[in-house]
Image (spheres, rainbow, N blue to C red):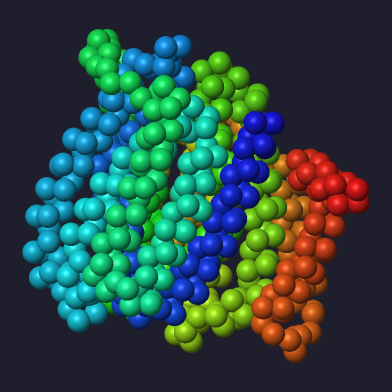
Amino acid sequence: MGQVKKQSIQNSLIQYVGIALGYFNSVILFTNILDLEQMGLTRVLFAIAGLYINLSLLGSPKILIRFFPFLKTIDKSHQGFLIFNVLLASVGFLLVTVIYLSLQNTIVEYFGGSSTQLFIDNYHYVILVSVLMLYTSILEHFLMAMKKTVLTYFLKNIFIRFIWIGEILLFHFGWIDFDTFILLYAGSYIVNFLIMFFYLLRLGEIKINLEFLKWRPRLLKIILNYGLFSILSGISSLLVNRIDIIMITFFLGLSSTSVYSIAAYISAVIFVPSQAIYRISMPLVADYWKNKDLDQMKILYQKSSINQLLIGGFVFLCIWMNIDDLFKVMRPEYSNGKWVVLILSLSILFNMMTGINNVILVITKYFRYDTIASISLAVITIITNLLFIPIYGMEGAAIATLISVVSYHSFKFILIMNKLKMQPFTLNTIWAVLVIVVTYLLTSLLPEFDIHFLLNIALKCFIISVIYLGILWRTGISEDIQIELQRQFKRISI
């Protein structure tokens, strides 16, 4: 757990700095500089690109993580593993691009209108975003497989946001028009790609060879078979996070997309610890599975659950107790997403509480069950969005996400418990939930402070921190968090 703890803390700190930059970027700059439809366009471009590259990658990211421990070599050629994945993803990208372009007339015919015309006019930018994110994703996961995650996290969560801040300010001061802004915004990932490429080149990890052509047919079949199942599971998982934005665009228009996406962005802050732990856990679980060390896998599973729940619960309380003040820095229309924040936050907390079940199923021999669950998730997500968006609008999309997430992770929890005889929950899970509820009730008793809303946010977060972290420090519900708190308190006292 030491390596997970060290890098996950580093990655969490990087991502929280990124979240702060992202808040300044998306919530303050973008929402006040761009009109609602322009803002909605920036959100839907990346939402569609996310689905686009997941199809195009043909499972390459998970293939890199899953099989790198078996194919890595001392001479860093890794049997042509990186080149194999680049070629595999390139074939996928060409196929998906043909399909995407062929769908343009259909989309224009059925969904074209004044509320989506701006997206139709910029339809082809999805291809630019997708191709850059595609190759960036391959290098990013290759570095993850090598257990080098801090640089990729910095580029993805901090560096790219500085680029976006520069681009939106260029537009704000009239130095570029909106069309140029969208071009620069769509092409931003080229910088991340180049930095990772030259970093790997410096490490001697970029080697052009075709050693994969010598792989035994059985190995190639296993890899491609795994990739096929990974495609389906990856797309299904992404549907939960992206299909709501896409369907809101076509049902309610780009203006509603912008409001919903900001609400989703605010709630997504809760998920930061999970993303950090997920990245570090994948190669470790792959090693545990290779060495048949299920005891260590179980320990990691349970620690990931309690730590994610406690950290996520703390962030949730800071967000929800200040939700009205958080919307004050934006145009009044964005406050319509308040209840979307609550519903999506509950779905994220449930996800975090189930630990690294995604990682375990993907890495172990039960990955086919993950695909079955993911396909079911996709079906549930699409059906519930179709049912609830026309009735409840943006809140309907959030409800659909909550239903999908609870169903999906409940299935995975039951499956892992039956197949691997391990589950993430302990008695401390109940205590963790009680800590969250008690802190919420105590904070709710506070009177409204007649001060500037930013000071009000800071004050409430401070009070929540004292109550919440104080309980965790004294009770030791999470050994990792208690040790870290004691270490920080000693540092402050010195």
- Viewer-nearest residue: 458 or 388: 458
Q: Is residue 405 visible?
A: yes
Q: Is residue 407 left or right of residue 38?
A: right
The residue at the far front in this view is: 175
Number of disc labels: 0
The residue at the far bottom in this view is: 450
For the point 22% across and 74% down, the residue is 118
Q: Quadrant of residue 220?
A: top left
- Residue 286 drawn at (x, y percent): 51, 25
Using the image, determine if residue 146 lies above or below residue 149: above
Q: Is residue 248 visible?
A: no
For the point 72% across and 42% down, the residue is 426
Q: Quadrant of residue 203?
A: top left
For the point 65% across and 24% down, the residue is 295
- Viewer-nearest residue: 317 or 415: 317
User: Which quarter shows the N terminus?
Assistant: top right
- Viewer-nearest residue: 187 or 62: 187
Q: Is residue 90 left or right of residue 98?
A: right
Using the image, determine if residue 224 lies above or below residue 39: above
- Residue 100 drawn at (x, y percent): 16, 53
- Residue 188 drawn at (x, y percent): 34, 54
Q: Is residue 307 left or right of residue 165?
A: right
For the point 36% across and 42% down, the residue is 193
- Residue 326 drawn at (x, y percent): 59, 76
